[in-house]
Amino acid sequence: MKSRALVAAVIGGVLLGACGGSSGSDESVEGESVTVEMYDNRFQYTEIRIPLGGTVDWLGSGRNPHNSVAADGSWSTEDVFESLEQLEGDSAVLRYDDAGEYVFFCTFHGNAQGDGMAGVLIVEEGG
Amino acid sequence: MKRLALFAAAAALLLAACAGPPAGDASPAATGDTSTDAPSEWTGVTRNVPSEYPTIQSAVDAANPGDLILIDRGVYKETVSVTTPGLVIRGVDRNEVVIDGEFERPNGFEVLFADGVAVENLTSVNHTINGFFWTGVRGYRGSYLTAVNNGDYGIYAFDSGDGLFEHSYGSGSPDASFYIGQCNPCDAVISESIGEYSGLGYSGTNASHLYLVNNVFRFNGTGVAPNTLDSELIPPTRDVVVAGNLIYDNGYQDFPHKDSQWLTQGFGVLLVGVDGATVTMNRIFNHPNGAIAVAPNVDANFWMSSDNEVVDNVVEGSGLGDLALAGPSLPGNCFEGNDPAHTMPPMLETSQGCGGLRWPALFEVGSFASLFGRVVENGLDLDTDVFYGDMPLPGPQPQMPQGADAPVIPAVNVFAGAQPNLGSIETPRMPAGEEVTQQKGINIMGVTFASTLGGILGLYAYVLPMVLYASWVVIAVWEIVKRDDLGRGAGLGWMAAILVIPFLGVIAYYIFGRSQVPVAYRWMLLAGGIGAYLVILAIGMIVGGVV
């Protein structure tokens, strides 16, 4: 019985490991600690809501380099990752201590007007 | 049996549950919506740079849809971001109007959700990401452009439809000189252009219904690579036509590359995970692997190629095979009229011709087994380290006819005028001074020795399972012959099962046939070899960074 369970576990693990893809999602997300994948060439979520003091993990998930930068210049993944070029698997976790609504964009594939690869981050006071 | 069915169902559910591509929608412009915000005609207004506007960006910002931005000679150190539709942005001299990123700025030109923008007759160099970039647009055109030593792509259209790149030149990009991605139908054409000294001359991910005609792709890692990936929307790539191109000498030089370009080097045309492509009337020679190869692609999903037609090309000078079909693949890939000197697997045009019966060849994996070694080499950083800024600079490129005085035409309804007539395409002649130099390389059962690890690990990945299987069969049959406790009928029955039912027959014999081989040896024979094989593969995948 043990050996059957082991075989089943190994096969199941191989099957799960083989797929390894990104999970599907809507375009908005809310939470205290949020991960946002940066695909080619779009953000996983284009509207993100977090409470004051919440964090966003900006995770490179494309074949091309990406980043996330506030249109008003108040924050950037470069602050943490020390480069604007995050490749697949590169993570930059930012903590947000100032409430507000921030347009963010990838400087390579969007612009500060919210065109192209861009979205909105809402940091809610008392959220 | 019930357990087997349950397991199969569970496996199917597991795979189905995890194999979805990232959610989201491609733009309407990239999926057949023909509406456009761009005017189809010039407004008659010309905005001159730098005599009226000191920078290109300032002229663009002042322009109305349908204006002409005319740029005089000079080196412009800026990124030009365009969000106004229907502009025509033109240099007065292709070689002397230069946008220089100085290896600091990401893009030379970026056209963001602005339909119908045409960029003409100028050069973009030394950007960390792209030379020219259109995204989310309906209608785009790049004519007589030069893109040199840009860190991702040279000339690039993404999530866009109705486009043309013509008479343009791209080199020194680690990903590709020309790239079109995420569109179906793309309604796009790349013609009369040159892509060289890049990871790929052309790459197209999830880019369907487009034409590559009468181009030159040389000195890259691989020449042309339509492909399917889960990292972009609307897979797979379908209905690509590659016709009348001159493709040669890819896979020899040091070239800037990303990981995937390093792994797949040495092909002229490589269709990976593509459906319904037509590759015809091309001249393709001198490649360490193959002139034309059809193969699957692995990402979150396993994308198999199907229904691709490789017909009437001139293919010469390939190390592995002038034509190659690597499995697993879906049915319908066919090869005819290419007159190859050798193919992998052998006699491909006979077994997989475009007329009549095609023999099953869906699991031919030898052609690509040596990629496993490349994966490990890449993980160990044994790949060459080439900076994209160090690629050779091209000589002066041909000017756009009439230059500054050419008709001003926004990029509206481009594809209708650019779609090629395939009946008029001819196979390019051998260029003067070039000759076929690549000889058939050494390979064992299709595993090449293009690199040391590629050869060793490729053989391990491909040959060992067959050696193991052969040893199972030989030992089992020999034992049956020697056994006294089996009657003749039972012995012949087991032999038939072993010889007729691949893999399962011999495994059944060892488990249920009361084999005299001690249990420990049987387990070592059956599971030990496979276990070692899987461990080696797993280590290779981990070292290679695949998992």
Image (cartoon, rainbow, N blue to C red):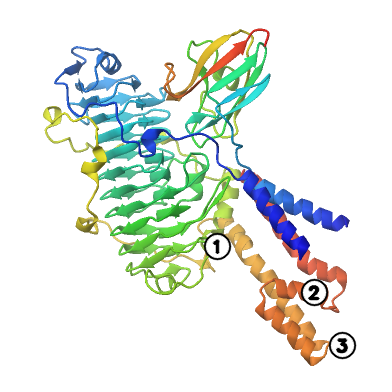
Which comes before the other along the chain, label 3 or label 1?
1
User: What's the CA distance linking mark 2 and mark 1?
Assistant: 27 Å
In the image, residue B172 lies at what x, y percent? 37, 38
Q: CA distance from mark 2 to mark 3?
A: 15 Å
Secondary structure beneath label 1: loop
Q: Could you say which disc has been placed on residue B365 in the image?
A: 1
Q: Quadrant of residue B142?
A: top left
Which residue is pictured at 79% across the width and 92% down the height? B488
**B142 relative to B299 in the view: left or right:** left
Mark whose residue sits in front, 3 or 1: 3
Q: Residue furthest bottom?
A: B488
Q: Which residue is mark 2?
A: B510
Three-letter amino acid code at the position of disc 3: Asp
Identified by mark 2, the residue type is Tyr
Q: Which residue: 67% across, 16% down?
A: A54
Chain letter for mark 2, please.
B
Toward the viewer: B204 or A99? Answer: A99
How many residues crowd around disc 1 within 10 Å: few (fewer than 14), some, or many (20 or more)?
many
* Residue B99 to residue B16: above or below: above
Task: Classify 10 Å Cα crowding around label 2: few (below 14), some (14-19), many (20 and above).
Answer: some
Task: Determine the secondary structure under disc 3.
Answer: loop
Label 3 vs label 1: CA separation? 41 Å
The N terminus of chain B: image quadrant:
bottom right
Residue B229 spot, x, y in % from top left: 50, 44
Q: Is residue B320 visible?
A: no
Whether residue A37 is situated above or below residue B294 in the rendered picture: above
Residue at x 56% of width, y 56% of height: B454
Residue picked out by circle 3 = B485
Observer able to see residue B545: yes
Horizontally, residue B186 falls left or right of residue B491, namely: left
Under circle 2, the secondary element is: helix
